[in-house]
Image (cartoon, rainbow, N blue to C red):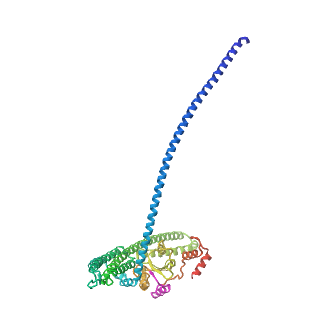
Amino acid sequence: MSPESLEPIAIGLLIILFLGLILIVFGYRRARSVGEKEGAALLIKARKESKDIMDGARAEGKSLLDRARAMMDKAREMEVRAEARVTRLKQTDKEMVARLRKARELLENLSDLANGYAADIEIVTESDLLSSQQYQKDRKNSEKVLKSLAKDAIVGAEGRLSDVNIDKFVAISAKADMAGALLVTTVEMLCAKTTYNNGTQVTEKLTESLVAVEALVKILDSRASIARDFKLALIRRLDIEIKYKLAKQVAKEAQRELREREREEAKARKEAEKARQEAEHEEAIKQKALEELQAIMAQETEAERAAHSEEMARLQAELEEARQKAERAKSRAQETRQGHVYIISNVGSFGNKVLKIGMTRRLDPLDRVKELGDASVPFAFDVHAMIESDDAPALESKLHQVFNQQRVNKVNLRKEYFYVSLDDIELKLSEIQVDAMLNRIPSADEYYQSLKIEKLGLPVGTALPDEEFEMVMEEDD
């Protein structure tokens, strides 16, 4: 094809290309125009929605602000009321304190009389305790007597003298009846609050009530007083309740001690049986080893047997020791009275003048001492003597009887603490021919270290060097 024939085709293609470019440019401009219009519409719509949201937020914020202001006003009002109430309570408290001060002054002025009433109460000992059935009977009788005597609880307001106004006499008589009823109610309330260990406190409360009521009665008529029989009946009623609660506590402690002894005996039997089995097992092992060696030596020459003679002697000695150990364990398992009597102290808890004399049937008696030094006391116990005995309960009982008057607790005889020295115990043990090694100096390590830490102002838990601890011991001595 000649170049001349290609020229029209090239021109046509250029025209088509030019037209295409014109169409593209036109389409782009149109699309851009449409996009700008749509964007403007969207922008207007977004601005309108934003304005609506802002207007709504302003309205909601104004509403919340109004509510917050209202709540603040209410809180201020409540604060004002609270301050007013606190002021009233303070004023009432001042008035109550003033009244209480006057009442205390009245009781202090009559303290001698209160002590006289308290002296009428007998000291309760365990030997005075009766059965709970007898106490129930005594309580009913006491309540009956009180109701009878309460009608004439006040004596001395006669009203027969010419200068006594009859209206005033009637008023005094009515108040006298109220005084009797008040004291009966008071003693019953004190009985309800009585426990085995607050007898002294409730007795003091009763004497204070008697003094206060009699003082009020004398304000009405200086000649009037509480009848002595009525006072004694009130004291008797409370005394019965104190003894009743103490009897219940003693019975409870007796049951607890019995259960503790049963647990102790069961544990001791279990330990003894375990020791017996272990001893018999050890004996069987030693016996078997000895028999095996004997069988070997039976087949050996005289010279070879001589070489094994030392081993044979050793096995025979070990077997004999194992047999004795088994016999002791068997005897311990069968005998329930074997045990140890221990003498221990706790300087940090009870001072250096108090010793505990107790008994345990444990194979390892120190286990019992560790139990006693648990969280119920601040420091561990120190052991001064651990006396093994074939009849430990009898030895313990004998020592308790000897030092009975030196008991710390002279009411509950199951408490085994005594004001006694190691010299006294050693002398008594010598008299009854009991050999015992006594450790006279308690270590009380934690107690003495605690004193030093407190004295030096050191942080709690500080471990003192040995030389510091020695200084503590020397200073305390």
Whether residue 275 sits left or right of residue 215 in the image: it is right
Give the extent of the magenta segment: 417-434
Please name the residue shown 69% across and 17% down the image: 14
Whether residue 230 sits left or right of residue 433 in the image: it is left
Res. 170 image quadrant: bottom left
Q: Can residue 129 be seen here?
A: no
Whether residue 341 sits left or right of residue 214 in the image: it is right
Quadrant occupied by the N terminus: top right
Q: Is residue 29 magenta?
A: no
Query: Which residue of the protein is positioned furthest toward the right in this rendering?
Result: 3
- Depth check, front residue: 429 or 424: 424
Res. 42 image quadrant: top right
Q: Is the residue 432 above or below the residue 447 in the image?
A: below
Quadrant occupied by the C terminus: bottom right
Q: Position of residue 136 (x, y in %)?
A: 29, 76
Q: Position of residue 278 (x, y in %)?
A: 47, 70
